[in-house]
Image (cartoon, rainbow, N blue to C red):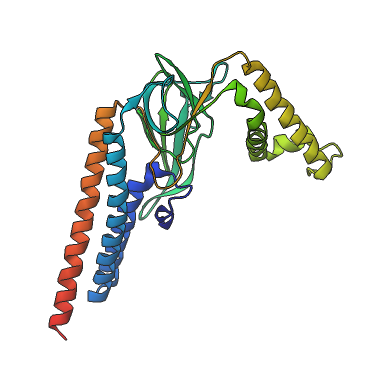
Amino acid sequence: MLDVLRLDGLRRSRLDESALGIQGFAVATAFHVGGATAFLVAAIIVLAVGAFAWTYAYRRHRAVADTPTSRVASAPQGFVELFGTARPHDGRFLAGKLTGSRCVWFRFTVEEKTKDGYRRIEGGTSDDTFLLKDATGECVVDADGAWVLPAHRKRWVNAPYRYTEWWIADGDPLYALGAFSSVHPSDGAAMVADETAALLAQWKKDRPALIARFDANGDGEVDVKEWEAARAAARASVLKSHRERAGQSALHVMRAPGGDRPFLLSARPPEDLVSHLRRWMWVHFGTLSLGCGAAILLLAARNSFT
């Protein structure tokens, strides 16, 4: 849970719940241990986590409320807000891990019942890209690192396990706030190395398939010579894709922005998203205030007895 304090690579869609979980755990531990010191430490943890979560929630809310909506075809390069419809790539289909629901993105968890509640034993998020389409064009969305608010959720229990899946379906409305960039056909040569590296990284995620395809000597590993063959195949695939796109318009991509700017995806209309983010902002402000007040009272009580 402490990974919530690391923004790099964080699955931000769970930040709010994780912050509340850390605070609740700190308070429960204080009641279990007992004593003024334990409660003071818990109050400081609630205060610190609340301050961190409120700061991020405030920035996230202001980014959505203050950024004007752009059209795909005319969006500027950089930090952009888009609104359209979620669509899969042509000829590519994605199904939920647990429900099998047709979708463009999903997240799932499997939890086991224990005497203290449910314990997460498995979970994951799809890593396929998908499309945001509006009346002017389409944009490829790479959801890695995004704070995602999906439209659909299904939960069921098959003792002792509890299964939950969230997903964005094909055709759902899709709001996106993140780093927007466009690659024009004339820029293709400069992008070959980057796209080749990205394709190789994708292949490496499926090691059995990589070995089956490029392990020429059958030793169960991909050696230096075989890796060069894989690199050549990836480059050939990228070059083929560039040739196919030569007569097409620019390729638009939305991904996580650098720095501390938020990356948000939502299958709700922008006005609903703003209300949702505002509620979380006030929740974190409330825990921040409670932690601050409790810490002040406990320190005052401690000083009065010294």
Residue 85 pos. (x, y %): 40, 20
- Residue 90 vs 188, above or below: the answer is above
Location of residue 11 by image quarter: top left
Q: Is residue 63 left or right of residue 89?
A: left
User: Is residue 161 or residue 127 the one in the foreground?
Assistant: 127
* Residue under the image location 87 percent in, 39 percent down: 217
- Residue 40 vs 93, above or below: the answer is below
Residue 232 pos. (x, y %): 77, 32
User: Among all residues in the image, which is located at the extreme bottom?
Assistant: 306
Q: Is residue 163 left or right of residue 53?
A: right
Q: Is residue 284 left or right of residue 165?
A: left
* Residue under the image location 33 percent in, 47 percent down: 17
| Quarter of the figure with the C terminus | bottom left
| Quarter of the figure with the N terminus | bottom left
Say if residue 177 shows up in the picture.
no
Say if residue 238 shows up in the picture.
yes
User: Among all residues in the image, which is located at the extreme right?
Assistant: 217
Residue 272 pos. (x, y %): 25, 30
* Residue under the image location 52 percent in, 29 percent down: 129
User: Is residue 186 or residue 207 the one in the foreground?
Assistant: 186
